[in-house]
Amino acid sequence: MSGDAKLVYLFSELNEAESRVEDWDGVRGLLGGKGANLAEMTRLGVPVPPGFIVTTEACRGYQDAGALPDAVWDEALAATEQVEKAVGRKLGDPHEPLLLSCRSGGKFSMPGMMDTILNIGLNDEVAEGMSQSTGNPRFVFDLYRRLVQMFSSVVLNVPDQLFEEVLSAARRHAGVMTDPELSAGDWREVTRRFKDIVKTHTGKPFPTEPRDQLKLATEAVFRSWGGKRAVDYRNAAGIPHDLGTAVNIQTMVFGNFGEGSGTGVAMSRNAATGEKELEGDFLVNAQGEDVVAGTRQTRPLAELNDFMPEAYAEFEQIARQLETHFRNMQDMEFTIERGKLWVLQTRDGKRTAQAEVRIAVDMVDEGLISQREAVLRVKPDQVDFFLHPQLDPARAESRKPLAKGLNVSPGAAVGVVALDADTAERWARDGGKDVIMVRPETKPEDVHGMLAAKGIVTLRGGRTSHAALVARQFGKPAVVGADSLEIDLDKRELIADGEVVKEGEWISIDGTNGIVHGGQLPTVVPDLGNPYLLKILQWADEFRRLEVRANADYPRDAERAREYGASGIGLCRTERADAIAELLPLQRNDFAGLFRAMDGLPVIIRLIDPPLHEFLPAYDELIQDLADLKVRLQHMHTMSEIDDALDQIRVKQDFLERVSALREANPMLGSRGVRLGIMIPELTRMQTRAVFEAACRCAREGVDVHPEVMIPLTAHVKELQVQREALENEARTVMTEQGLEVDYKFGTMIEVPRAALTAEQMAGPAEFFSFGTNDLTQTTFGISRDDAEAGFLMHYIRNGILADNPFETIDPEGLGRLIELAVAGGRKVRPDLEIGICGEHGGDPRSIALCHALGLDYVSCSP
Ligand code: ADP
Ligand code: MG
Ligand code: MG
């Protein structure tokens, strides 16, 4: 940390923060997302309670030093004085006390990950003074007990359960069901008991000095950045661990001042569907965290209009202003204190894939963003979502649901009920089960279970509850607020209208409609018919440079691929008929089907690839057969029987000799790929004949055919030359027979490092390259995929030896380097060399990005 850098900024000092960093992204990096937006709202004139931000840089200082550096604290104290001046109240002053909240906020929002502490500045003296000045001791002691509870559980690690027990005892004692019914005296007593708990549990009294409270809270936020919950979340969300969090210290405003006050959360558009309508939840006479906690039943935001029409109108206008300013859907928190509206937070709203595509398209129509921006906003996994299952309507619609709730995160999930996060995680991870986690509500410490589960159900909570937010962010189907369900944790079961589902039994949830079904319902994969998605994909087509082809072996796959917009076949494998003589007519028909489906587009057909032994009788079987025959021979009597058996034995023995001669220790590195074509020229000839007969036949029908014949696993240019000659001879023969010429290409797969290293030579005979990235990964790493994934590779990934599975995402440094070399070498000789990849990497977003960066022409992936 440099000595003179500013470490604390008032919300009103945004300009100074901006002068230190280049752009808005940098501001967010320094002030955190929450702080940056609070400061930006302050600049826009939105009513934000005054406050200041302790920067992420200070957090890194804390992490380095293991304690809050003095310089940071001095600046924070100075900023506190500024805030005191701005609001005309003082921290610790019993007559005009300033109360503060302490909130974390890193560059990326991590919902619910770090706990906010409200009402800092209260102690016995301040509470008494405030009771007098407000004339409302009930209100003051409710604030005070909240401070003691939050502060002690978050900062002092006192188990929250202890406080909850006091609360239920207080309710029982007073004979009431809910907290709002408790009296001033009740809260005074609860506060006293809370402080006793703290003293017993920590051995020290609850800190009474407001500045100590503030300092301890600030440190606790910085400490929590390194806590397990936060680390797990960052791992799951791909957020770097060295960013650090900022701390926002802000003047308290009170939504729990009485019936004229309230608090709520709102989204500027519908987060599930994307529809343009303000939606949210609010509570009258409540403090902020009550809404998200899902402990009290919230009201829909629209009803705020009935309670407080002026505040509602102002909020509606601010929501529009913020959306236009940030050019994105906003997720906002507000509090109304005695009729006066305050905005406490705004951020880009988390939303479902459906909402994302719709909002992106709508915002283009509204002139807020460009088409390009719209395309960039939609993430690959959001497109992927549309390929995921929904409950089969034919089966689901006729059934009586177990329960209904809010449809907060769409899609279907089918799994066994797990009633807590640890069970969900254990069953999913160790048992390999599909799990639906069912909870009364969720809290940050449940996130690991939510991540492990296929879907989430909560009994309480609204559209902005913790469960809803986290589910949407991770694309987990979820139904929240299914309040007709009951959980019996003693019996470990779920009760719905008298029906019992035991933990471990199946349920099926429909997050699109908010329905929970008993049992294991079938699911269907929807088509890509969403009109907003199609629009985004159509725009994407206008910007992209990479072509997309499909790997398809059968005409059916080719038709589907074409329907989805594939611009050719990048890989048609030819190895599935086992007897060579039977291969020809079958293959001819398939090829013809592919050519028809891809009329006008290239179809790459790879010649036979698998190891030779796959075409031969199995060695073990032959041995067994021979043994059986010999046993039978001993029981034979007639001469003709014996002669027959001897004949059979001779044939099998010949086979066995041939098979043992061809037997390989490492078939995957043996006679396969191009080596087969060279050892058995018949193979190449026959397949070429099949390709060209089919091509000629289709051409005669008027189909525009473009066969591209591809040789697998070549390592040396000589192999290609030999194959090319064999192939061209046969192709010419067929075309002469058919009296027709078809346009074709000859090319090679690049699957071994030598081929990549000698790309300049390979590009002589080859008119195209296709990187077979599966084999290339095996040959570059020198590992076999099956052995690796069943063994050491998972260990490598778990222990961080490899960051990613190279069979899922192309290894950018090793494979990427080879591809780069091969592209350069090939294009040097043949500038128009057509280059792509085939294999599973062709469907992996990061691999696709790499292929784009390396200048490939296309990726080919499964249809
Ligand atoms: P989260 O990141 O979990 O949303 P926040 O820091 O936004 O945490 O705060 C939790 C709750 O406390 C929110 O409902 C918020 O509106 C409320 N809150 C935070 N600061 C204040 C404040 N100064 N006055 C009133 N309520 C506040
Ligand atoms: Mg918040
Ligand atoms: Mg291969």
Image: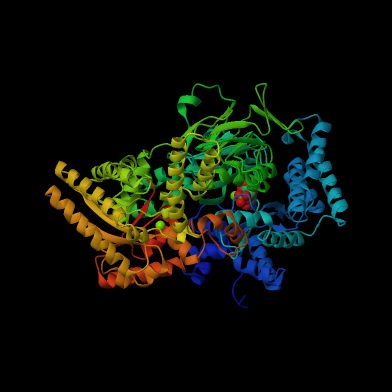
Q: Quadrant of residue 241?
A: bottom right
Q: Is residue 830 left or right of residue 780?
A: left
Quadrant where the C terminus sits is: top left
Q: Is residue 425 above or below residue 27?
A: above
Foreground residue among 131 and 106: 106
Residue at position x 23%, y 63% in the image: 725
- Residue at coordinates 17% horizontally, 54% vertically from top-left? 733
Q: Residue at x 42, y 47 (%)?
A: 651
Tell me the quarter of the image containing the N terminus. Answer: bottom right
Q: How is the image coloured?
A: rainbow
> In the rendered picture of this protein, how many numbered marks are placed on residues?
0
**Left or right of 558: which side holds 235?**
right
| Left or right: 585, with 226 as reference point | left
What is the x, y in percent for residue 793?
A: 57, 59
Residue occupying the point 18% across, 47% down: 696
The furthest residue to the left:
739
Q: Is residue 741 visible?
A: no
Where in the figure is residue 243, as x and y percent of width and height?
A: 58, 64
Q: Do we see residue 174 in this rendering?
A: yes
Coordinates of residue 661 in the picture (x, y in percent): 45, 58
Frontmost residue, 322 versus 405: 405
Q: Quadrant of residue 237?
A: bottom right
